[in-house]
Image: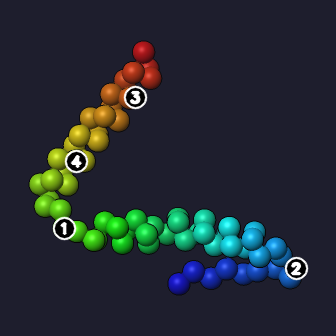
Amino acid sequence: MIIMPIKEGENIERALKKFKRKYERTGVLKELRRRQYFTKPSVVKREQKIHAIYVEQLHRNEEE
C-alpha cells in the first residue's frame, strides 16, 4: 500500500503527481501486464539473450 503524506496547503495536483510517480516506481502495473499471459521459459530466455546482445552492441559502438 502506498502512503502519501500531504503537507498542509499543498496543491492537490502536485500530490497526485507525486502519487503517480511513486506508484509507477513500484512496478505494480508492469507486473500486472506481465502476468496477463503466460510465456514459456525458453521464450523468456531467448528474449533476454537478444536484449543482452543488443545492449552489448550499444556499449561497443559507444566506445568506438
* Upstream in sequence: badge 2 or badge 4: 2
* Upstream in sequence: badge 1 or badge 2: 2
5 or 10: which is nearer to us?
10
**Mark 3 packing: few (<14 Cα in 10 Å), some, or many (20+)?**
few
Res 2 quadrant in image: bottom right
The image position of residue 38, as x and y in percent, is 18, 67
* Upstream in sequence: badge 3 or badge 4: 4
* Upstream in sequence: badge 1 or badge 4: 1
Q: Nearer the viewer, mark 3 or mark 4?
A: 4
Q: Which residue is mark 4?
A: 47
Instruction: Please name the residue shown 43% across and 69% down the image.
Output: 29
Q: Which residue is mark 1?
A: 38
Do labels 1 and 4 touch, CB within 8 Å? no
* Upstream in sequence: badge 3 or badge 2: 2
Instruction: Please name the residue shown 22% across and 43% down the image.
Output: 49
The image position of residue 56, as x and y in percent, is 33, 32
Element class at badge 2? loop
Separation of marks 1 and 3 at Cα, in angstroms: 32 Å
The image position of residue 62, as x and y in percent, is 44, 23
Q: Nearer the viewer, mark 3 or mark 2?
A: 2
Q: Which residue is mark 3?
A: 59
Q: Nearer the viewer, mark 1 or mark 3?
A: 1
Separation of marks 1 and 4 at Cα, in angstroms: 14 Å
- Check disc 1 and give the amino acid type: Phe
Q: Which residue is mark 2?
A: 9
